Amino acid sequence: MGKFRNFWGDNQGIGVVEIILILVVLIGLILIFKSQLTTLVNDIFDRITSQSSGI
């Protein structure tokens, strides 16, 4: 019975599981919105390039 209590009382691995779940959600969002993110990043770099030539 003591081993069973130790098993349920050990919360050390919960942080790792939470990090993995967050990463899975982020990767999923990136895959879903890949084209929109690519367009946004390209627009930002185009603006930086065009405005830096004026400096």
Image: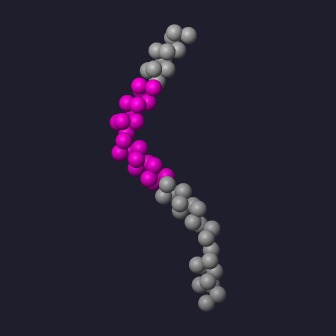
Position of residue 24 relative to residue 33, above or below, is below
Q: Work out which quarter of the rendered image holds the C terminus and state it.
A: top right
How many badges with numbers are in the image?
A: 0
Q: Position of residue 17 (x, y in %)?
A: 53, 62
Decide if residue 9 is on the left or right side of residue 34: right
Q: Position of residue 26 (x, y in %)?
A: 45, 49
- Could you say which quadrant of the image residue 31 lies in? top left
**Image quarter (top left, top right, bottom left or bottom right) of the N terminus:** bottom right
What residue occupies the far top of the structure in this picture? Answer: 54
> In the visual, does 50 lie left or right of 7?
left
x and y percentages locating residue 20 in the rendered image: 51, 57
Magenta highlight on residue 4: no
Q: Position of residue 18 (x, y in %)?
A: 53, 60
Location of residue 26 with respect to 12 vertically, above or below: above
Q: Quadrant of residue 14?
A: bottom right
> Does residue 38 belong to the magenta stretch?
yes
Query: Which color scheme did the rendering employ for the protein?
Result: one colour
The segment highlighted magenta reads: 23-44
Residue depicted at x 40% and y 50%:
28
- Vertical relation: 34 (above or below) 21: above
- Compared to 31, does 44 lie above or below? above
The residue positioned 59% from the left and 66% from the top of the image is 13
Which secondary structure type mostly characterizes the magenta part of the structure?
A: helix
When asked about the image quadrant of residue 47, the answer is: top left
